[in-house]
Image (cartoon, grey):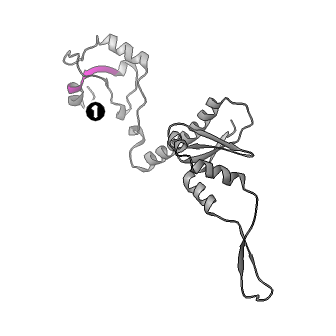
């Protein structure tokens, strides 16, 4: 699937401030003194992106709202999204609903977060088998709960129950009914990562 959204500024506020602070200038050498350089501002009609950035920078409610969901801005040829102090641009030509477009922006933001989490775990020195556990599927949890009658298999307590891997997850144990049992918190701590 082709990329539909791109992040083109990771610090939207700084991008706005820099564009608004910059002035278009040209340098000239007067004929009377070729060693002297004079700087003159260039007159140009108001840049649409400049107008848009000023509008965004002056709207505190947009910055607050953009921490939770993408906010769309458009002015003439310039169209962009503000989300978590980043600017995103849509690259697709398809017709998506506004809600779908927001989801595409949020997905692009999340891809980067996941990539950095993956890099962090890769270089943190934690063995790959211990990095994260996926959830036990609900049908497996229901089966184990019914099989063990909602009680700890060691002491028959029905308080603070936890799903325990008989062969520990860190030692290659699976998330199947045969490898799971119910243990109360105390029995599970006593067992630790031992195989019983």
Residue 171 lies in the magenta stretch: no
Q: Is residue 117 above or below residue 37?
A: above
Residue depicted at x 69% and y 30%: 96
Residue 104 is left or right of residue 45, and the answer is left
Q: Is residue 30 above or below residue 142?
A: below
Residue 46 is left or right of residue 189, and the answer is right
Q: Residue at label 1?
A: 193
Q: Which residues are magenta?
A: 180-186
Residue 55 is left or right of residue 191, and the answer is right
Residue 53 visible in image = yes
Residue depicted at x 28% and y 13%: 150
Picture coordinates of residue 100, whole percent (x, y): 63, 30
Q: Nearer the viewer, residue 88 or 75?
A: 75
Picture coordinates of residue 28, whole percent (x, y): 76, 78
Question: Circle 1: is it few (<14), some (14-19), or many (20+) Cα within 10 Å?
Answer: some
Corner quadrant of residue 36: bottom right
Picture coordinates of residue 120, whole percent (x, y): 45, 48
Quarter holding the N terminus is top right
Residue 55 is left or right of residue 126, and the answer is right
Picture coordinates of residue 105, whole percent (x, y): 60, 38
């Amino acid at each position: 699937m082709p990329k539909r959204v791109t992040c083109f500024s990771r610090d939207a506020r700084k991008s706005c401030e820099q564009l608004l602070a910059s002035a278009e200038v040209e340098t000239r050498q007067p004929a009377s003194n070729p060693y002297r350089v004079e700087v003159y501002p260039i007159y140009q009609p108001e840049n649409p992106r400049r107008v848009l950035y000023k509008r965004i920078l002056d709207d505190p409610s947009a910055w607050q709202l953009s921490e939770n969901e993408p906010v769309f801005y458009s002015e003439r040829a310039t169209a962009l999204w503000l989300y978590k102090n980043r600017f995103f641009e849509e690259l697709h030509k398809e017709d998506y609903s506004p809600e779908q477009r927001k989801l595409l922006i949020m997905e692009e933001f999340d891809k980067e977060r996941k990539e950095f989490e993956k890099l962090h775990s890769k270089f943190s020195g934690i063995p790959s088998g211990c990095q994260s556990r996926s959830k036990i599927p609900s049908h497996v949890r229901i089966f184990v709960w019914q099989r063990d009658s909602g009680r700890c298999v060691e002491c028959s307590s029905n308080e603070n129950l936890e799903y325990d891997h008989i062969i520990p997850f860190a030692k290659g144990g699976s998330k199947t009914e045969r490898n799971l049992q119910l243990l109360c918190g105390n029995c599970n701590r006593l067992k630790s990562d031992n195989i019983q």
